[in-house]
């Protein structure tokens, strides 16, 4: 279903975030993201020779995160190819501090505390949210497809109760992992009692 028809308007800014997940031949996973910002008008910019033209990249930032099967970060590489200020690329190596960290509950809060304010680049830090979900989709999606084509797993996935679809009181869990299913009526009775 499309969005409702907008009022008459003019495009001012476009942000495109692209994320891709790759299975490597050495058993690890490369998760890559690119953030591209463009304006629909030219504007003055001292650090870029006087002007940034309409449609020219204001930001062009790329991150590659290498993780293992358990979402533990093995390597980080970040580059800022285009930015409005010459000092922006100086921050990229600070993200190597993530090597050894495992993506999991509290990930976004950890990033905010570690790289917030003057300790990081707002745009690179923002990319680690989509990078994390792309890693999850890449690794666990590959496992899920493989297990569906083979013998279905009786072990419930670790992502139960992470969203409405994967609720332990939902139909999908009742069908696939009946031992993990909790009847919603029982949940309501426990809350009342």
Image (tube, rainbow, N blue to C red):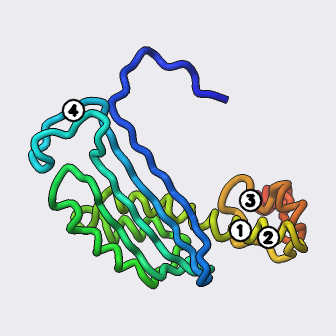
SS for dot 3? loop
88, 50: nearer the viewer: 50
Disc nearer the start of the sequence (3/2): 2
- Cα separation, mark 2 vs mark 4, equals 49 Å
Using a 10 Å C-alpha cutoff, classify the residue at mark 1 as few (fewer than 14 neighbours), some (14 to 19) or many (20 or more).
few
- Cα separation, mark 3 vs mark 2, equals 19 Å
Looking at the image, residue 52 sits to the left or right of residue 156; the answer is left
Q: Residue at image x 53%, y 71%?
A: 30
- Cα separation, mark 2 vs mark 1, equals 6 Å
* Residue identifier under label 3: 166
Using a 10 Å C-alpha cutoff, classify the residue at mark 3 as few (fewer than 14 neighbours), some (14 to 19) or many (20 or more).
some
170, 141: nearer the viewer: 141
Mark identifier at residue 179: none
**CB within 8 Å, label 2 to label 1:** yes
Quarter of the view holding residue 148: bottom right
Q: Residue at image x 41%, y 75%?
A: 76
Q: Quadrant of the N terminus?
A: top right
Q: Quadrant of the C terminus?
A: bottom right
**CB within 8 Å, label 3 to label 4:** no
SS for dot 4? loop
Q: Residue at image x 81%, y 55%?
A: 170
- Cα separation, mark 1 vs mark 3, equals 17 Å
- Cα separation, mark 1 vs mark 4, equals 43 Å
Rendered position, 87 above or below 17 = below
**CB within 8 Å, label 1 to label 3:** no
Looking at the image, residue 22 sits to the left or right of residue 52; the answer is right
The x and y percentages for residue 84 are: 20, 49
Mark identifier at residue 146: 2
* Residue identifier under label 1: 142
* Residue identifier under label 4: 42
Quarter of the view holding residue 69: bottom right
Rendered position, 164 above or below 69 = above
């Amino acid at each position: 279903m499309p969005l409702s028809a907008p009022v008459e308007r003019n495009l001012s800014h476009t942000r495109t975030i692209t994320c891709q997940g790759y299975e490597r031949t050495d058993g690890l996973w490369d998760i890559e993201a690119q953030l591209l910002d463009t304006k629909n008008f030219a504007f003055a910019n001292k650090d870029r020779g006087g002007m940034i033209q309409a449609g020219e990249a204001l930001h062009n930032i790329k991150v590659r995160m290498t993780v293992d099967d358990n979402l533990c970060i093995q390597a980080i590489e970040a580059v800022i190819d285009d930015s409005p200020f010459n000092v922006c690329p100086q921050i990229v190596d600070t993200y190597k501090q993530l090597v050894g960290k495992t993506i999991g509950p509290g990930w976004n809060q950890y990033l905010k505390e570690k790289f917030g304010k003057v300790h990081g680049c707002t745009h690179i830090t923002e990319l680690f949210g989509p990078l994390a979900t792309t890693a999850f989709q890449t690794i666990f999606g590959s496992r899920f497809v493989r297990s569906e084509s083979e013998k279905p797993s009786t072990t419930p996935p670790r992502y139960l109760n992470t969203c409405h679809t994967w609720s332990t009181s939902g139909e999908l869990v009742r069908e696939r992992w009946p031992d993990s299913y909790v009847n919603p009526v029982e949940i309501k009775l426990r809350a009342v009692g």
